Amino acid sequence: GPSSEPIIPTVPLTAQMRDSLRAIVGAKGLIEDEHGKQPFVTDWRGLLVGRAGAVVRPGSTEEVAQVVRLCHDHGIAIVPQGGNTGLMGGATPWPAHTGIVLSLGRMNRVLELDPTGYTMTVEAGCVLQTLQETASRHDRFLPLSLGAQGSCMIGGNLSTNAGGVQVLRYGNARHLVLGLEVVLPSGEVWDGLRALKKDNTGYDLKHLFMGAEGTLGIITKAVLKLWPAPKDVCTAWLAIRDPRAALEILSEAHSASEDNVGSCELMSRSAIDMVLRHIPGVQDPLRAETPWYLLLEWSSARARRDGAEGMSEKMEQFLADQLEAGRVLDAVIAQTGHQSHNMWRIRESVAEASRAEGPGLSYDVSVAISRIPEFIDLGLKAVLDILPSIRPYPLGHIGDGNLHFSFMAPVGMDQQTLTQYKAAITRAVNDLVTSMDGSISAEHGIGIDKLDELSHYRSKTELDIMRTIKRALDPQNIMNPGKVLRL
Ligand code: FAD
């Protein structure tokens, strides 16, 4: 976390304000007791615990606007929160926070699904998986997909510009959006809820709010793009020679699959072993004992037809060629939904397994795709030079040039001891990323966790633009204060 707490507004909630909040959201929409507030002031990892005067749960845009206007008029700080699965502490209030956590969870309606126009209009508190299932019932596909999908909410996904396992084909969360509705820090509602693919009428305001981590306003609704539902999907688990082979495999997979690569996830043996240790019921798809694996999925919207070659025949041929080329050492293709589910479960349980494993460090970095192998070599050397007994378990969305460069503490080392090494390791990793023209936060954002790193690694020009935007929209600094920017 950051070296010191940023200065945030600390105007307390008066009894009168609590009455006003209750009048807006009803008694059920206001949580004031410590026990009830607990889950909203603690982050997913359980490492950060903040405070809040109250948790407010509005049920409509109008209620959000009224709550924000009230806070604005009294200088009360607001922390917007969706599913609270963010990994950077963006949704967790600071310990000095006296204002509210504004939870979007009650705004969970799908307002419209237009199968012909391939769009879906939704409220910000819809759980991602529910939206995927809704699209699927209409034979449509919402491609945003990540390990937290059972609890993260679309407003949180857009506010973090979430990535996940299908970015390679469909882009980040911001690429899936046509329109937004946002409650500004003044309480004014910006209605940009348009379902337009083309709209070059001045600045594209929606992109300002996506990835802003709730510091510029509260996303209340969105128009999402949809795609045709996948009909022919093939998932394979590959033991591979090394990360360079992973890039070569991916590069050739694009044409071999006729441009149907959906996902390509790199995993280290140590990440897989960690999942097998902590997550009950998952099976190792291959007993190979090589250091690197790839989860490769191809999917086509065209249904399989009798006698015609489908995704799995194409994949089989491709894997045979890659075995022959020496890039793949062993491979298995999922034959049933259960088998492919098991493969995905391994990949998507890494965050949960690492939470169970205990103390660790994780860096969500990106570099140009072709430089991933070089980054892994140099990065491992740099970190092991500082703490030789640390246990790396790198993995990543390799098609996006995105690595989760992660480490378990040495066996027996506690969090406090690991923290003594953290500053040096963080500096080494981020300096390397920067020297390779990469990013110190590829998809998880800044939140509380990377406050110091952002101000260290982004240029003065960039930071000045960000501050100018923040001050223009939120002059009182009440909207998620002390996140992303220190100001
Ligand atoms: P929250 O954690 O509630 O909030 C995140 C940020 O957005 C906060 O700053 C909050 O203030 C703000 N916010 C929330 N809702 C709104 C709103 N309506 N308006 C304005 N601001 C808002 N992330 C990835 O990118 N890719 C992954 O593959 C991935 N995998 C994950 C796997 C696991 C197991 C876990 C636990 C997390 C993973 N994450 C991943 C991180 C996390 O799931 C994403 O950041 C997700 O988008 C957060 O959504 P949320 O609803 O939980 O948001």
Image: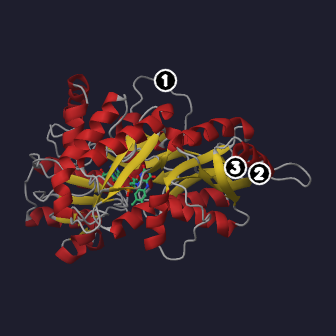
Which callout, 3 or 2, points to the residue nearer the camera? Answer: 2
Q: Mark 3 — residue?
A: 299
Q: Is residue 338 above or below residue 67?
A: below
Residue found at x 74% / y 45% = 318
- For residue 232, say whether it is visible: yes
Of the image marks 3 and 2, the number of the one nearer the N terminus: 3
- For residue 200, the mark is 1
- Which residue is nearer to you in this view: 177 or 47? 47
Q: Residues within 10 Å of mark 2 (few under 14, many from 20)?
A: some
Residue reaching furthest right?
A: 307
Q: The residue tagged with tag 2: helix, strand or loop?
A: helix
What amino acid does circle 1 point to? Asn
Residue 176 lies left or right of residue 324; in this view the side is left
Apparent side of residue 458 relative to residue 287 in the rendered image (left or right)? left
- Viewer-closest of 110 and 296: 296
- Say the numbered circle drawn on residue 190: none
Looking at marks 3 and 1 on the same chain, the residue that comes earlier in the sequence is marked by: 1
The residue at which mark 2 appears reads as 316
Q: Nearer the viewer, mark 3 or mark 1?
A: 3
The vertical placement of 271 against 228, above or below, is below
Residue 278 location (% of width, % of height): 43, 72
Image quadrant for the C terminus? top left
